[in-house]
Amino acid sequence: MDIKDIYAVFETVAVAYDQIEGISYSKVWDMNGQPSLKYPHILIDCQPDYTTVNARSSGGSKYLPIKKEYKIKVFLFDKWTLTERNETKPEYLALEEKQSEMQLIFERYLAEVQRYFIDVQSTNAFIKNDQPKGFFGYFNKHNDKLVEIFEQITVVAPSQCEKGTFTYPAP
């Protein structure tokens, strides 16, 4: 399983979830100036850090990697309209209410991603989060009409690396 396969799971779950309207694999500043995006919108940061664990380092005798750990930044963006911000309107939604609403959507989404990895794909990939860290953004610096919630998660996935073919010149 590689990053392409991991993103495919995030995308499959986002498309299936009735509370999510869009998903992209990009940088956070790409959210600015794209009026065609639909919200709430999941953004998977396109520059994840990763660590490879090979069999030798875990007590085996082979050199091939057996698993990879990807540190992936996952964002949920949503519009917070002027009407929602206006205390005199019936549609008023206080910032903490908007954040709570988004957090519930986000937690359900990540829980389903985890379930999908384990129950549907049976890949032995999983989200490893003993103490997930995240934040709420108010007036995203790239677009002041958006609010966001973010979490960095670690996805542990089995490696698909197999021995390559090498031809060395005769001595």
Image (cartoon, helix red, strand yellow):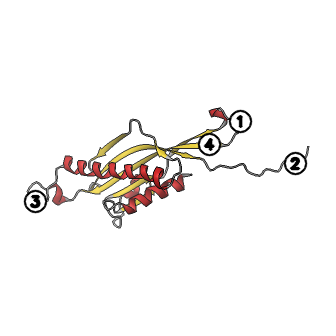
Mark 4 or 2: the one toward you:
4
Position of residue 150 measured from the top left corner of the image (x, y, whole percent):
35, 46
Type of amino acid at the residue the image marks with label 1: Ser
Q: CA distance from mark 2 to mark 3?
A: 78 Å
Q: Earlier in the sequence, mark 4 or mark 3?
A: 4
Q: Which residue is mark 4?
A: 66
Q: CA distance from mark 4 to mark 3?
A: 55 Å
Q: Which residue is mark 1?
A: 61
Q: Farthest residue to the left: give it.
A: 88
Q: Earlier in the sequence, mark 4 or mark 2?
A: 4
Residue 90: assigned label: 3
**Residue at 42% from the left image edge and 51% from the top image edge:** 115
Figure check: 66 above or below 92: above
Q: Which residue is mark 2?
A: 169
Q: Earlier in the sequence, mark 1 or mark 2?
A: 1
Q: Earlier in the sequence, mark 3 or mark 1?
A: 1
Residue 31: assigned label: none
Mark 4 or 3: the one toward you:
4
